[in-house]
Image: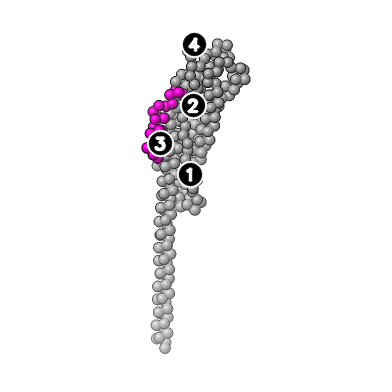
Amino acid sequence: QQALAQRDWLGITIEVLVVTVGVLIAIVAGQLVEDARWRREVREFRRAVDRDIAWSLAGYQVRLRQSGCVNRRIAELERWRDSWREGRPRRLKGSVGSPITTGMPTSAWASRSSELMLHIPYQVRRDYGSLNDSLANYYQQIVAEREVWRSLAAFNGARRLSDDNLMRLSELIFRAKSYEHLLVGNSSRAMKTATRLGISPSFDDSDMERAEMERARRDANRELCTPMMEEP
């Protein structure tokens, strides 16, 4: 009976070990499957976010390439305003124009979940957050800048400016200068962060949109870049 009892305990011990090992294997296998699933989801999420960011950065570059024309137009508006103040008003032969800007896709970044973000390394997660904050700030500035140039368009064809008109023009010139300074100044930080994440500016979405954006970059907004004031 003693030998039988020993065999029973040995059998029980072996069974417990087998069950324990089986449970551990199942847990490890489940964890491996779960890890593989999260790696796939993170990879797909980052691919979608990178595509949106690349588009936004390319749009940012389109805007920055027009800075020379923007600054020349602002200087021209200042000279036009000063000609009225000095009693020797000059006429406009063209339109004020406005910079070409693009939208900023955010659907991929907005779809993130807190659980998914925990599976992205901290520094990478931080860079994505910083870059998307910078781009959101950029887009707010672009929207505000559009309103400034739309307001400046009210002076197209103006033949008489009152003191109130001149004050309003001065305000809009100041605001246009401020947004130009902000947009140029904030770009380097966004570009550096994108480089760390391995993202380059690109309109890689559709042939039609890419061709349209390339046209905008090539033409560099002819209306804005063409002098609008008659020579004295």
Instruction: Tell me where residue 172 appears, x and y as whole percent.
Output: 56, 25
- The residue lying toward the viewer, choosing from 183 and 16, is 183
The kind of secondary structure element at disc 3 is helix
Disc number for residue 63: none
Disc 4 versus disc 3: distance between alpha carbons?
42 Å
- The residue lying toward the viewer, choosing from 32 and 146, is 146
Of badges 3 and 1, nearer the viewer stands: 3
Disc 2 versus disc 4: distance between alpha carbons?
24 Å
Of badges 2 and 3, nearer the viewer stands: 3
> In this rendering, would 150 be left or right of 68?
right
Q: Which residues are magenta?
A: 200-225
- Mark 2 or mark 1, which has the lower sequence index? 2
Labels 3 and 1 touching (C-beta < 8 A): no
Q: Which residue is mark 2?
A: 98
- Mark 2 or mark 3, which has the lower sequence index? 2
* Residues packed near mark 3 inside 10 Å, few (<14), some (14 to 19) or many (20 plus): few
Q: Which residue is mark 1?
A: 107
- Magenta span: predominant SS is helix
Q: Which residue is mark 4?
A: 232
Question: What amino acid is labelled 4 in the image?
Answer: Pro
Q: Residue at x 53, y 18 (%)?
A: 157
Residue 210 among those drawn in magenta? yes
- Tell me: residue 95, above or below residue 27: above
> In this rendering, would 88 be left or right of 215?
right
**Residue 73 visible somewhere in the drawing:** yes
Disc number for residue 209: 3
- Tell me: residue 130, above or below residue 178: below
Residue 97 among those drawn in magenta? no
Disc 3 versus disc 1: distance between alpha carbons?
18 Å
- Mark 2 or mark 4, which has the lower sequence index? 2
